[in-house]
């Protein structure tokens, strides 16, 4: 099939490349010329394990192309995906200007007669498919009829950055909300190679498909937040959240995943999607109280570690110097959007401390954002030199079993504030570290 993907970011590039991998002819479109130039030469613009190889192969075999021209990119495309940003607007609702802007252009460009499927892959509020269809009809000057010349499908994306290629190639489920049987058939055919292991394609109406994405992300954000509150209460009551987590997770109804406490959820999706769902509810006069609580608790959680650091240093961080391991909002990505590490950096700098950070993939993005307000190290150990303490903000695997002797000798004080609970408490006790982690006993050798 001939496919166009409009928006070549994390979702667009992964989707486009994975669609090409099963034999489709894909053109990815973006307004960012620098990005398109790099991609055309096979330089992948994001860090995503496995993506570079796939991209290279499909470019070489002419199944994958990149362009800045919408009209050129969508020419003869049977399916046009919209993988555009839907950032929060000033009031917290999803800003649809990118999606509707492209829909307006598509109204002028799509040819009548060929049934074209326009797919919302962006995370968009309930009712957006209808608005996209309306914009297309309006800008076609009466040339296009919904259901006859085109259909707008809601096909929300559930991939996780860091394992996006795997998630896309073997999704837990594919959700498709469509108006016409023809669009359902085309989408079913497109996704057939990705659901061979009997993972389902769930056909539904468009509104339900749109809401499914927000409900799923909000539920996951709630699960994380619930555990963060359990961790807080563990600290106050002298329980160990690791034990509690295992005890809870063994119950099949609860499940083992997403029960790890930490320094809050971040990234480009959970914060904005929880906010957008709360806003959608408000627009129909419903107060989604759980989501309000989730947002408030998570906001606090991102800097929850700061008062613990201050307490250790008797309330004064002026002149203190910290090593910071991890900047990305989670491991295996270079994405720093809403990363808790950024909130910790801001608080430490405001308190007069200095920071040397290390992250395997995200340092260029943080450098572009923060300039030289913090220092960057070439490896985790270099960051430790003469630091008053180590702070861990992202659970990259390479931080899990460091050479503790080296860590202890490079740091000025053997002090670790671990926002991701990477280390064994008994080990830290034996190694004589001061060790604070979330929801567990604080190890204090003094
Ligand atoms: P992104 O910012 O990485 O990519 C969006 C791309 O769209 C950018 O490259 C931008 O230059 C381009 N763009 C903007 N306006 C354009 C236009 N008029 N024409 C062509 N290109 C244009 O965003 P993303 O992370 O890929 O997210 C896209 C959507 O997918 C969002 O709605 C997001 O919520 C959703 N989503 C994201 C993830 C994720 O993990 N990142 C997962 C599931 C769903």
Image: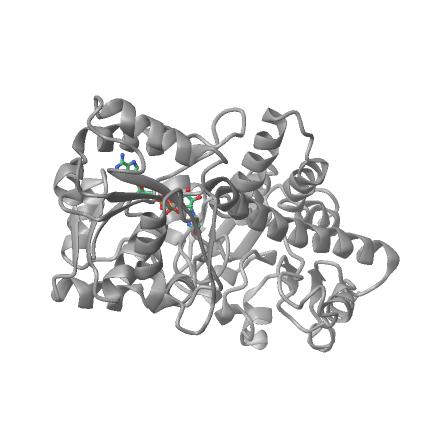
Q: Left or right: 77 with respect to 254? A: left
Is 90 drawn above or below residue 26 in the view shown?
above
User: Residue 263 at what x, y percent from top left?
Assistant: 63, 52
User: Residue 424 at what x, y percent from top left?
Assistant: 68, 73
Q: Residue at x 43, y 64 (%)?
A: 167
Q: In the image, ligand 1 is in what quadrant?
A: top left
Is 370 drawn above or below residue 243 in the view shown?
above
Q: Left or right: 437 with respect to 88? A: right
Q: Left or right: 294 with respect to 396? A: right
The residue closer to the viewer here, 255 or 425, is 255
User: Residue 224 at what x, y percent from top left?
Assistant: 65, 54
Q: Left or right: 444 with respect to 298? A: right
Q: Quadrant of residue 248?
A: bottom right
The residue closer to the viewer here, 287 or 305, is 287
Q: Is residue 92 visible?
A: yes
Quarter in which the N terminus is drawn: bottom left
Is 221 drawn above or below residue 100 in the view shown?
below
Q: Residue at x 17, y 50 (%)?
A: 66
Is 93 drawn above or below residue 46 in the view shown?
above
């Amino acid at each position: 099939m001939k496919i166009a993907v409009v928006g070549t970011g994390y979702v667009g590039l992964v989707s486009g490349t994975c669609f090409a991998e099963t034999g489709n002819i894909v053109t990815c479109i973006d307004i960012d010329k620098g990005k398109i130039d790099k991609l055309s030469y096979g330089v992948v613009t994001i860090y995503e394990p496995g993506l570079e190889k796939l991209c290279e192969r499909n470019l070489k075999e002419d199944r994958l192309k990149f362009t800045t021209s919408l009209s050129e990119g969508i020419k003869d495309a049977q399916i046009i995906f919209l993988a555009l940003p839907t950032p929060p607007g000033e009031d917290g609702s999803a800003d649809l200007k990118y999606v509707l802007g492209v829909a307006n252009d598509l109204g002028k460009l799509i040819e009548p007669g060929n049934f074209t499927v326009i797919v919302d892959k962006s995370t968009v509020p309930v009712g957006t498919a209808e608005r996209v269809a309306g914009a297309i009809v309006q800008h076609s000057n009466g040339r296009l009829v919904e259901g006859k010349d085109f259909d707008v499908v809601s096909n929300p994306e559930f991939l996780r950055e860091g394992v996006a290629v795997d998630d896309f190639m073997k999704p837990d489920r594919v959700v498709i909300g469509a108006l016409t049987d023809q669009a359902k058939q085309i989408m079913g055919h497109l996704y057939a190679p990705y659901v061979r292991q009997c993972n389902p394609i769930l056909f539904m109406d468009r509104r339900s498909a749109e809401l499914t994405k927000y409900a799923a992300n909000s539920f996951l954000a709630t699960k994380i937040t619930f555990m963060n509150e359990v961790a807080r209460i563990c600290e106050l009551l002298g329980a160990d959240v690791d034990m509690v987590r295992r005890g809870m997770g063994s119950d099949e109804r609860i499940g083992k995943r997403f029960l790890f406490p930490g320094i809050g959820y971040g990234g480009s999706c959970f914060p904005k999607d929880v906010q957008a769902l709360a806003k959608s509810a408000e627009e129909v006069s419903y107060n989604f109280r759980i989501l309000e609580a989730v947002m408030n608790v998570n906001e606090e959680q991102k800097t929850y570690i700061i008062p613990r650091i201050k307490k250790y240093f008797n309330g004064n961080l002026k002149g203190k110097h910290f090593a910071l391991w991890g900047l990305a909002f989670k491991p295996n990505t270079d994405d720093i959007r809403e990363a808790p590490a950024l909130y910790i950096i801001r608080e430490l700098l405001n308190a007069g401390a200095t920071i040397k950070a290390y992250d395997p993939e995200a340092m260029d993005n943080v450098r572009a954002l923060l300039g030289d307000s913090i220092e960057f190290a070439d490896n985790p150990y270099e960051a430790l030199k003469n630091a008053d303490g180590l702070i861990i903000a992202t659970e990259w695997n390479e931080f899990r079993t460091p050479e503790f002797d080296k860590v202890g000798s490079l740091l000025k004080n053997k002090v670790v504030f671990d926002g991701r609970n990477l280390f064994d408490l008994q080990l830290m006790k034996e190694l004589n570290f001061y060790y604070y982690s979330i929801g567990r006993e604080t190890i204090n050798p003094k």
